[in-house]
Amino acid sequence: MVELSRGTIDIQPQGHGVDSVFPDLVYLPENAVAVLREQHVRWTRNGELQEIPLLPGKVYMSPSGYQIRMEKHPNAPSWRLIGTSSHGTFCHKPCTVSGGGKSEISKSLVDYMHYGPLFVSNLEEDFARIDEIIHKKDYHLRWRKDYENAPDYGPNPKSRPIFGPQRSLGSVIKLLNPSADYSDEYNEWLESIPGYLLSMLFIIKRFEQENWDENWQQLFGVDIVNGEPGHELKYRERQLVGTYLRVGFIGPRKWRTFKLRQDFSASVKIQMEDDITSSSVVPANRVPYLADSENSGSLKFVVNCEYRLFQRPDEAIHRGFDKQAEADLAGPANFISNFEPLTKNDVKRMAEYVADFDAFSQPMQNLLRSMLDDENCHYVACSANPRKVDGKPSKNPRYLQTRPDIVEPFARYVSERAMRLARKIPFDQPLNIPVHSVLMGRRNNPPDKQAGIPSLAVYNPIHYQELPELFMDFICSLTGKSPSTTGFGSEGALTKGPFNALQTAADLNAALVSYLLTDLKVFSTSAGHIGPNVQVDHDISLLIPELWCRLEPHERDPDYLIREGSLEKLEDREFEGEKIHVSRLGYRMTQKFIRNYFGRLFDHPLSVFDQEMLEPELQDEAAFHEGVRYICEAHRKVALQYLEDGTYNDLCPPLQSLINIMAHGNDNGRDAAHPEIRRMFTKDHLLNSDWYHQRLVAKQKADLELMQQHRSYIDRWIAQPNSRQEAERLGLQEKREWVEKQICEIESDDYLNQLTGTIGLQPRN
């Protein structure tokens, strides 16, 4: 049973309303309650109980924008209620280098999850031990004696019970996963408990009902197989199914698989941008109807400029793994590149291996079968068959995907309606959705001495960089080897003229101003490899947005994460007599980050990223330091190019200082850690600087010139012979008056103040 959040909305007289655009969106009154077991939504109106049935495929929305839907488990005979927050998290991935996971950040995790039964060892013994964990452990004794933040249990110490409303499932997962804040004795006790036993306990907590202490063992069991108790766990009369997710590989494509929480449901992702995106920075006080966490400083807004997205479906080579790519490629009017043209004989041979052929999703199976049935069709492209180049499958197949929010607009429509209700936005006013988080992508590769490719796998899954270190990376645009690159080097959006016609200096200056004004903190996620031994491909890019949308705004603040020990600063170090500038990697996540937050996704969060993934140098110390050395050398080479080709002269002072540090190690004797250098990358320094004032003056001048051009154009049009009637029809006189008003406003002394908080304009030389 789920009680929908309270709020206000105009409801039709019968108490609920159906959306006029999408009838599958149903609006509910504020006191509505959804009851899954009875499959109804109920509320009281004028003292009378009213109800409507819960139907699959429909979304029920409360006056606060909170949404609920009834959903069948994809691999089990059960239904559940899924609740969705009214406010989403806008994750922006800027200037991503090739292979950095730009597309994957917006792909649904559903296609990448797989399912399996949940096993017990000996049911009676397992239940007895679980009962001990629930009832016979003094959890108030778990804290280290020197832990300052341990709760005060008072004169009668007693921790919150595992069963009951005092603890959520997430709280129980935290309680039963080791922590540096716990005593060694307690951590050793936790590590003695088999993982499957804890997963059973989490499932029992997941299905908790009233008076659960008294009868939970009666509701769980196993079948009798050949006269003996079996090992597949059941709840009531149905088999329980666990959901698992791959997070990387070990060795020759051996999956690293982890169990997701039993109550996990993948977030609804809406792709907001791709290769070509327009962005703007606006002071928050100029934008109405914002969420509480958005009402400060300046905000970044981005708009996708594309109708089709240039996709490289890396995982589609595994049949049935990327269901979205298979559905896209099975559709009509495709534009594809680097896929093998398969003949009828090729497809016949594929179809003979029934089990392998059945691994394809249904749309791809239908396409291949239809090709065999169509005598006029001679070739077909299959998602799992890239074109062969020199006898080997290409690693760079591509296709143009029509934007998912255009093909299936329902999810986006529901999300926007929810935000409108939550923010109480009138229907005649626009909905403005600013960027909330920045998740930059990195492409990492292990060393390949035979090919002469150095290591770039020096980052752990999540890093945070302050602006000086971040802009060293932006300036260099460094990428590792990926399917669309030839190897380690400076390559990416900033270096591709066809994608970006702006001068590099203008682009970098605007980017710096944008980050300073918006105070957006930039985290990076790894693709490819983490250290030389762990291959992750795009698994991290897919996973992290699932976590990010479950974080509160303050939990996405790096200052908060640093204070609580979830991020650790990397310091320069000596290796084989040489100083290695490891500090350029910024901060990286710690085991505390995993324990505090990944329990919102996984049963056993600490197993997902072990210490060798958190500290890649433990895999190969020499390769790690060599990788950092090559990064610094790439920084130096690119900075020297900027000095030689004159780009340096057009950069703003903070970036000029950064170029000198990258090229020579210092700027007038100051390195990157110098307080004066750090101060140059602050908002206060920006707002009080001459160079930012010059950007605002340049913007004022450009705006004035544009309006004067508009006025001249209108005047020339009106001055033409016999133009009076047409000018009246077009309302040119009113338009001219509006332009005059704009000119007066732009010429006023207050206009520069109005521009403060925007990125301004690059001054002309």
Image: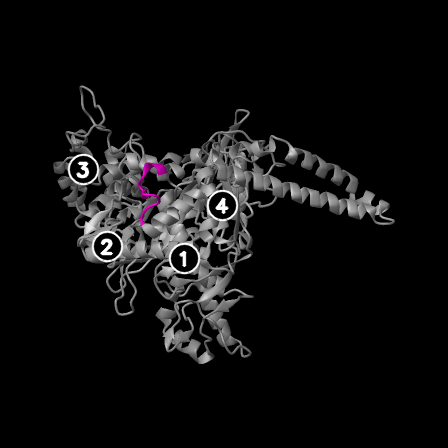
Mark 2 lies on a secondary structure that is helix
- In space, the residues marked 1 and 2 are separated at their CA atoms by 25 Å
Q: Residue 210 placed where, x, y %? A: 31, 32
Q: Amino acid at mark 1?
A: Gln
- Asked whether, in this view, residue 278 is left or right of residue 214, the answer is right
Secondary structure mostly seen in magenta is loop
- Asked whether, in this view, residue 46 is left or right of residue 139, the answer is right
Residue under label 1, please give it: 641
Please say if the residues under marks 3 and 1 sit with CB atoms less than 8 Å apart: no
Residue under label 2, please give it: 625
Task: Tell me if mark 1 has few (under 14), some (14-19) or many (20+) residues whose alpha carbon lies within 10 angstroms of its own.
Answer: some
- In space, the residues marked 3 and 1 are separated at their CA atoms by 63 Å
Q: Residue 602 placed where, x, y %? A: 29, 46
**Disc 3 or 2, which lies upstream in sequence?**
3
The total number of labels drawn is: 4
- In space, the residues marked 4 and 3 are separated at their CA atoms by 57 Å
Residue under label 3, please give it: 133
**Disc 2 or 4, which lies upstream in sequence?**
4
Q: Is residue 85 visible?
A: no
Mark 1 lies on a secondary structure that is helix
Q: Which residues are magenta?
A: 665-676
Is 107 or 263 nearer to us in this picture? 107
**Disc 1 or 2, which lies upstream in sequence?**
2
Q: Is residue 675 magenta?
A: yes
**Disc 1 or 4, which lies upstream in sequence?**
4
Residue under label 4, please give it: 510
Q: Is residue 563 visible?
A: yes
Task: Tell me if mark 3 has few (under 14), some (14-19) or many (20+) residues whose alpha carbon lies within 10 angstroms of its own.
Answer: some
Q: Is residue 371 positioned above or below 678 on the image?
A: below
- In space, the residues marked 3 and 2 are separated at their CA atoms by 45 Å
Q: Residue at x 27, y 42 (%)?
A: 569
